[in-house]
Image (tube, rainbow, N blue to C red):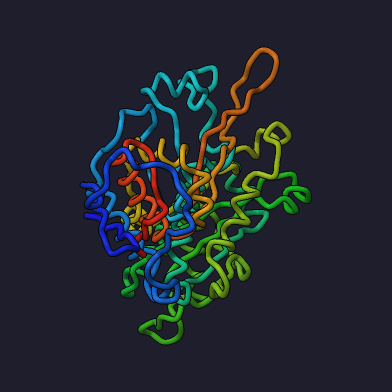
Amino acid sequence: MFQQVRAQGGGTYNPEGRRPGQRPDRCSSGDPSAIRASGSRASRRHKGLRKRLHHVRDLARGLPDLGRDYAYAAPRVGPDLKVWAVPQQGEAQLSRMGLSLPANSQNKKRSGISGISTGGKKQIQWSCRLMEEFRSRTAMWTVTLTDNDYLELAASRKWPEFQRRIVDLLIRYLKAHGDEAVVIACVEIGGKRFARTGRPDPHIHVVTTGWGRRHPDGGWLLSPDRMDELVAKACQYAGLPLVERSSASSIAKVRHSVASYMSKYLTKQAPIEVDKVDGEWLELIPRQWWNQSESCKALVDGCLFKLPRSFAAFIVRNSVLLERLGMGRGGNVVVGHKKTKLHDLPIEVFRFRFKTPELLQQAMELFAVWIECGETLDVRELALSG
């Protein structure tokens, strides 16, 4: 399954057996300076992130659930290469930690009222990171309605219908003209407009494929006029009047970074306090803050994989070593707060973020050696695969 971990002296170390001539009691912590990765970074640049993640995913699938039965959840790794060591002894333990609250009539809020969920942010970030691979074919589409439109949508409570329809129309339009329709969208409430109107007027930011593709009738597939036509259809579906909306949408090529473009909107999803919003405008606060096409979901799902629970213990115990090897950075991260009678206690979880898929693969090889050597490492003479 793994490439063999090679010793500089010419011998080999197989994760399923010891290096020839080495006794198991000699495994111990050592100087990591002798570890080196074969192959240069430049030689791997031609491979896209998706293919590199698929390679590591295939290796992870063949990795048995080695080690002791630690009380950690099996880490799920995505395109951000973050490995979380989450303590877990069943759902009841998660509740006692404060990581989840049983839903009931006392604490359940209307969906979307607290802004975008953590899972939604991950999906957007993962999608944008993978779309960097074909950035030259992606575009940014922003949809903003008029003041009268928002008044109508607040009264009719049909913002959710408009939001779903605008994304569905784009996906169908792209597929009808031969595009794979990789689409990710998020909703933003602009602080400046809220200060002017007192309403949480939402607008939609979309990253989509299709840029540079020609329309059969001439012109570009993602031209401003054709995007405005999609907005008009979505407005009609939501019951808005047929009026001229010349500046309802803008479309432009993604020139620098897909991820950085969307990340700035994720940091300001709800720049308002809900208790300061008049009740008549609450229906403008989205119930779903993001949308994703099936192609985009498949793109992300294909790059997700799980590691053994003992791998979480491995990164916690060996984080300093992994950092000294230049594999990434680790530490405790505050993921929430648990309310007590006196004050709110922070809930911290250990996280290690690897720099590249290749370095994660090397950590998986070290993990196999760590298990074989009774959860100790002697890395002075080992050279990891690249």
Q: Position of residue 163 (x, y in %)?
A: 49, 52
**Viewer-proximal residue, 340 or 320?**
320
Q: Position of residue 350 (x, y in %)?
A: 51, 37
Q: Is residue 369 left or right of residue 333?
A: left
Q: Is residue 313 visible?
A: yes
Q: Is residue 247 left or right of residue 372?
A: right
Name the residue at 51% across, 61% down: 206
Picture quarter with the N terminus: bottom left
Please, which residue is most extreme toward the bottom here?
A: 218
Name the residue at 49% across, 55% down: 325
Name the residue at 30% across, 46% down: 368
**Viewer-proximal residue, 182 or 324?**
324
**Viewer-proximal residue, 35 or 164?**
35
Picture quarter with the C terminus: bottom left
Name the residue at 58% across, 31% down: 336
Please, which residue is most extreme toward the right here?
A: 196
Residue 38 vertical placement versus 221 (above, below): above
Q: Position of residue 321 (x, y in %)?
A: 49, 47
Q: How many marks?
A: 0
State which quadrant residue 265 falls in.
Answer: bottom right
State which quadrant residue 148 falls in.
Answer: bottom right
Q: Is residue 202 left or right of residue 81?
A: right
Q: Is residue 288 left or right of residue 152?
A: left
**Viewer-proximal residue, 276 or 101?**
101
Q: Position of residue 157 (x, y in %)?
A: 54, 41
Q: Is residue 161 visible?
A: no
